Image (cartoon, rainbow, N blue to C red):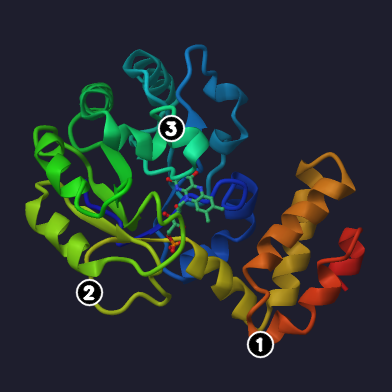
Amino acid sequence: MKLPRLILAPLRGVTTRCFRETFAPELREAGFEEATTPFLPAMVGFNPAKERELEMPQSIPITPQFIGKSPEALRECLRRVKDLGFATADLNAGCPFPMVRNKGRGAGLLKTPDVLERMVAVGCETMGEGAFSVKTRLGVESPDELAGLVETFNRYPLRYLAVHARTARQMYEGECDGARLREIVALSLAPVVANGDIGLPVEGDSQPVMVGRAFLRHLGSRADSRELLARYAAALGERLCGEAQVVGKLKELLMYWRHLPRWKRLWPVLKLARTAAEIVV
Ligand SMILES: Cc1cc2nc3c(=O)[nH]c(=O)nc-3n(C[C@H](O)[C@H](O)[C@H](O)COP(=O)(O)O)c2cc1C
């Protein structure tokens, strides 16, 4: 299976199905060929038919992402999404939040290599060769940790290893570590998808990359950003139950626009707005 050159990064609460459907034309225009969904819990009893994230249609092909630490629960979830027709799936081994990672999920999996290996084994076995991927970070405390785990990943036919080139401890602060990322590229048998602070447009014929926040900023810097915001407000209005929720989602997107020349002066007013109409003027 050929890898997409540009994948939309999962941003929980932001790059939801509603967002992806609303901005599908802009995503395509920017070169995105696929999106990884924000994480879904890998839990026993998971019912994909109830997940809005996975509802059809999906204008941009998606790979469902799961977070968890139970190989058996993961197996059940993967069987169910496969039955629904999804050909690929992804494991979240990078969520940096202490509440998640201290319980051994997300980036916490890097601290329990035996559990990580069983999750990867179950993923590859259930989805099939070249159909299961892992999204991770360079480490939890130190950027050297992932290099020590590549040998484990190399035992399995992963679709790719997506690496956000920071440690979990860094959260979203500080620089990405390009040198460490290149080290992983050299060690990994699976293709490495680079992630973290990559801008748009992506230059040249690079390796596959995953981009998140730069696409959000791209939307805000477009000449038609006001219309895009109005389109999003309308789509959110149809999906969400109350004005407060719509306003919350709009502000979440505007947070990524607040430093852009076009939006900088408006932000102090917009952040106080209580209705969508005040935002979409
Ligand atoms: C608000 C927010 C939510 C995120 N949610 C997820 C998630 O559900 N799963 C995941 O693997 N990464 C998640 N991430 C990490 C991003 O996918 C990505 O790795 C990170 O933003 C770096 O890429 P970027 O600089 O291109 O945005 C999230 C990041 C942010 C800022």
Could you tell me which residue is drawn at 73 percent across and 53 percent down? 249
Question: Quick one: which residue is furthest to the front in this view?
Answer: 141
Q: Which amino acid does the dot numbered 2 rest on?
A: Asp
Q: Which percent across, then down, holds residue 39?
A: 49, 38
Residue 109 appearing in the image? yes
Front disc: 3 or 2: 3
| Circle 3: element type | loop
Name the N-terminal-most of marks 1 and 3: 3
What residue is pinned by disc 3?
A: 102
Name the N-terminal-most of marks 2 and 1: 2
Q: Which percent across, then down, holds residue 240?
A: 79, 42
- Foreground residue, 120 or 3? 120
Residue 224 quadrant: bottom right
Q: Which percent across, then down, holds residue 235?
A: 75, 52
| Circle 2: element type | loop
Mark 1 CB near ligand 1 (8 Å cut):
no
What residue is pinned by disc 1?
A: 261
Q: Tell me how far mark 1 sits from mark 3, CA to CA.
A: 39 Å
| Left or right of 63, for residue 157 | left
Identify the mark at residue 205; answer none if there is no mark: 2
| Left or right of 255, for residue 191 | left
Q: Which amino acid does the dot numbered 3 rest on?
A: Asn
| Left or right of 40, for residue 70 | left
Name the N-terminal-most of marks 3 and 2: 3
Q: Which amino acid does the dot numbered 1 rest on?
A: Pro
Could you tell me which residue is drawn at 53 percent across and 24 percent down? 48
Front disc: 1 or 3: 3
Q: Tell me how far mark 3 sits from mark 2, CA to CA.
A: 38 Å
